[in-house]
Amino acid sequence: MTRELTCIVCPMGCGLKVELDNDKIVSVSGNTCPRGKQYAINECTDPQRTVTTTMRCDGGVVSVKTDHTISKDKIFECMTIINSYFAPLPIHIGDVIIKDIFGANIVATQNKEAAWTIN
Amino acid sequence: MTDLVIIGGGPAGMSAALAAYESGIRDILILERDAALGGILQQCIHNGFGLHKFGQELTGPEYAWKYEKRVHELGIPYKLNTMVLDITYNKVITATNAEDGMFEIKAKAIILAMGCRERPKGALNIAGTRPAGIYSAGTAQKLVNIEGYMPGKNVVILGSGDIGLIMARRMTLEGAKVQAVCELMPYSGGLARNIEQCLNDFNIPLKLSHTVIEIHGKERLSGVTIAKVDDRRKPIMSTAEYIPCDTLLLSVGLIPENELSKSADIELSSVTGGAVVDQDRQTSVSGIFACGNVLHVHDLVDFVSDEAEIAGKCAAEYINGEKCSNISVNLKTDGRIRYTVPQRITQKKDITVYFRVSDVFRNVRINIKNGDKTVFSKKKNKVAPGEMESIQLKAELLDGVSELNLELEEV
């Protein structure tokens, strides 16, 4: 069986072809870098995504992300957990807000000193 | 008198300021309309920025912070909440803010970095009522990501530009149901990766060659009628389909924001909507430079930063009296290549020429011609309107030439 994928690792969006034999990966083609090959392998075994979203905080929201990719089928559970939290201020880029959800930490991607400022 | 005034504190403005500083200019002032530096990146909380510049996948605010941090470290002055009202040909800037009131600054050089804005619904001519619940995709993005409000629960998106695709995922993650993304053209204007990770991941249908033909609802949007379009982009009425929804997001293109450029009598391109510039990103007005989305709409912020570095460095050369011109070559295009930036070359050196194409083409050659003679040719497997392309133009091709033509050849 052949699976055709679009690589999401970078904006080039290479068209990937994965040859599969009963869920076993035989070969990957169409990638222009090693990360593309790894993406194709993950996509056919355990698809992974980075989740980027916001978390409530005093006076609004602050942007956050998973510091690693998590399994694609855990995205909505991850969202539910993030939306049940309230981020403390001040907060800075890289601050860990929640530890170890599905193997990733939730970190801030924005600086927010007080309720009325973005940075 | 200020050496360099930069209008706009987004990725282009900050990058230009840092490049000018590194070229020895110290008397710099950035004027920013918003309450923070960073521009539109502050609301682009998704990742994918910075792969070219930093080899990292950053979110928008993280990418902006890389530059803002440097601005703070170097102590480059900026004014927030400051609206520039007017620029003149001889580089007098009129601006206003709550602290200083209305004020004038005379600059030796100006860099325009005002970015772009979204094409509004008024430009679209959709029949029907005008209820609440219709937003540009970027407005919805600001509501969700900055203000923390959801603009609706049941969404149709018109236009498959990147912001529309990103918002399809964003609304879905926050619990909305995105019914469909309709795209008038037979191809998407967005990046392939965004179709994959924003639509396919969530089983959101992308309806190519479809458009919204009617808006329904009295106070709040109650639904839209969509239809397939023929190859002349006319709706085929027999395919009309009613979709109940409370929100319509429009992602139908970006327009460089050039009101200030017009007031300074800067020559604008009818294709890009931005200024006509030379290789240094200098406009038709000597000492006024432009970079970023105010010059032409970019696909990646990394290229905005690159372009702004050119503008910043060359504005510094202008201020120091080092900018020289020794040739005059106009770059023309064949229509299939819609435009180039720069549009003209005034100095003999190796130059990266950026361009966009008018349609999706496969197996093409990009040819540069001097009259009938092809002086440069490069093969591309695929080009698409959503993606900015570039070629390297060698200095020796500019010898004794007044015009070069860029042509797209299908092979």
Image: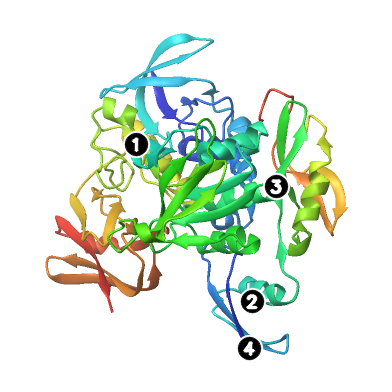
The reply to whether discs 1 and 3 touch (Cβ–Cβ < 8 Å) is: no
> Which is more foreground, mark 4 or mark 2?
4
Alpha carbon separation for disc pair 4 and 3: 35 Å
Alpha carbon separation for disc pair 1 and 4: 54 Å
User: Where does label 4 land, which residue?
Assistant: A1
Viewer-proximal residue, B211 or B218? Answer: B218
Q: How many marks?
A: 4
User: Where does label 2 land, which residue?
Assistant: A37
Lower sequence index among marks 1 and 3: 3
x, y percent for residue B39: 53, 35
Q: Which residue ends up furthest to the right in the rendered image?
A: A99
Q: Is residue B98 visible?
A: yes
Q: Quadrant of residue B365?
A: bottom left
x, y percent for residue B409: 25, 72
Lower sequence index among marks 4 and 2: 4
Q: Residue at x 32, y 74 (%)?
A: B364
* Three-letter code, disc 2: Lys
* Three-letter code, disc 4: Met
Q: Residue at x 18, y 49 (%)?
A: B328
Near mark 1 (Cα within 10 A), the count class, few <14, some 14-19 or many ≥20, is: many
Q: Residue at x 36, y 22 (%)?
A: B107
Give the letter of the chain under mark 3.
Answer: B
User: Where does label 1 land, which residue?
Assistant: B289
> Which is more foreground, mark 1 or mark 3?
3
x, y percent for residue B287: 30, 32
Viewer-proximal residue, B235 or A118? Answer: B235
* Three-letter code, disc 1: Phe
* Three-letter code, disc 3: Gly
Task: Identify the element where label 4 is drawn.
Answer: loop
Give the letter of the chain under mark 1.
Answer: B
Near mark 2 (Cα within 10 A), the count class, few <14, some 14-19 or many ≥20, is: many
Alpha carbon separation for disc pair 4 and 2: 17 Å
